[in-house]
Image (spheres, rainbow, N blue to C red):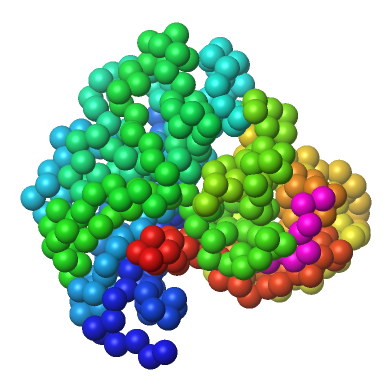
Amino acid sequence: MTSTAEDPCVLGIDLGTTSVKVSLFHQASRSVISTVSKATKADVPSDVETGSEQLASKIFTTLQECMSELQEERCRQVKCIGITGQMHGVVMWSELKTEGWQVPSTSHLYTWQDQRCTTEFLESLPQPDSHLPLSTGHGCATLCWLHRFRPEVLDDFTCSGTIMDLLVAMMCGLETPVTSVQLAASFGYFNTKTMSWNKQNFQKIGFPIQILPDVREPGHVAGNLQYDWMGICKDTPVLAALGDVQCAVLSVASSETDAVLNMSTSGQMMFPVRPEGGVPDHPDMTSSIQYFPYFDGQFLAMAASLNGGNVLSHMVIMLQQWFKAFGFDVNEDKIWSTLLGLGSDASTGPIIVPTLFGERHLPEQKVAISGLTTSNLDLGSVFRSLCKGLVTNLCDMMPISVMESHGITTVKATGSVVDRNTIIRDEIAKHYGSFKVEFGSSCDSATGAAMFCVKHLK
């Protein structure tokens, strides 16, 4: 079917960790009309050494830049807006303006990569009334840390949520933010069975629960666009924001026997299951597999590693610093192309445990290297072993035996690291050789959010 500028379409927005992507999706043919993606470069220094913070205003400026490149006549046909993005992180705000596009005064966005909540601090908090454990980087954990150590930060704001919840509130003029159960579960201290925040736990520590958003099921219309925006008409429905991982899986998983391996900034192995398929009643901090709300009453069995492309990026930064120490300036692209062109055999290289950022179930675990010899110290051996270690780590977190027990037959490998790194693809093919491994699927959260909009409109 050939689409025209008069055909109804929907808009998917993905506010990611490093970039923003928008996707116009044709409603009738269920196909992408156009997409635009731009890096946000929103990172800012944190006053905590282990913190990870971003400027919300920079993210929204990037969104505006992306939207400006879409055809205005297409945008006028948008019938629904679906928003997704980086889970777990938290931003605070107050006093929304509803007269056109205006970003309110906000705190920094404390991202999912934030490591300020130590094991000792988390153990000092009440045990969550949830099947999901509380980890550093989770919105509620960060808010509890700020409540204890930076109470003046909380005093300046009346609302909190993910960066996507803030965008929905801005678009719809919401005094009380609304989020989906997908994002609430990623925040921590949320019970998916009762659909409620752990009020008693917050009362124990004097936490201002009124700052948290209201929670609804996926597909809930949070409100209508309060103004004409970038060609999209006023009163267009806006859905409560969704999790980027859930939307990414929705965009590529076509069968109940499909698992999705995604490796971008971080890495995930995941597949949908029914609640009766083994979703626990209580949190297990030692388990590498957690169950997040998905769609249609399902949960997403997920091993979510904190380590992926971010580890490889830090290796590139390290090499740049080494070169500078010797008086050489080597740009990032040159280092990447050289590393990817070094064809060493990982089977003879050192063994690298690549957990530079720890893992939620093993927060104290750091990088470890063993098996170094005089014959495998070359850059190619080290880089290939690091790539192998990332895939091995993810495979350890989601054992093949668990996947087989759920009837998984196909692994769809996707993500920016998989697309660009032939070494990673080789290692995925080796590790998951007992499954049908498919490359080339476009695991796209913005498209997944748009696809869910189409389903809602039906």
Residue 156 screen position, x and y as percent:
23, 25
- Image quadrant for the C terminus? bottom left
Which of the 4 image quarters holds residue 333? bottom right
Q: Please state the total of marks drawn on the protein image.
A: 0
Residue at image point 66% right, 65% down: 255
Image: 41 above or below 291: below
Image: 399 above or below 448: above
Residue 362 seen from this side: no
Membership of 298 in magenta stretch? no
Q: What is the magenta range?
A: 405-412
- Image quadrant for the N terminus? bottom left
Residue at image point 77% right, 52% down: 406
Q: Is residue 330 left or right of residue 7?
A: right
In the displayed image of the protein, which residue is found farthest to the bottom? 2
Q: Nearer the viewer, residue 367 or 1?
A: 1
Q: Nearer the viewer, residue 53 or 400?
A: 400
Residue 189 screen position, x and y as percent:
49, 26
Residue at image point 24% right, 49% down: 223
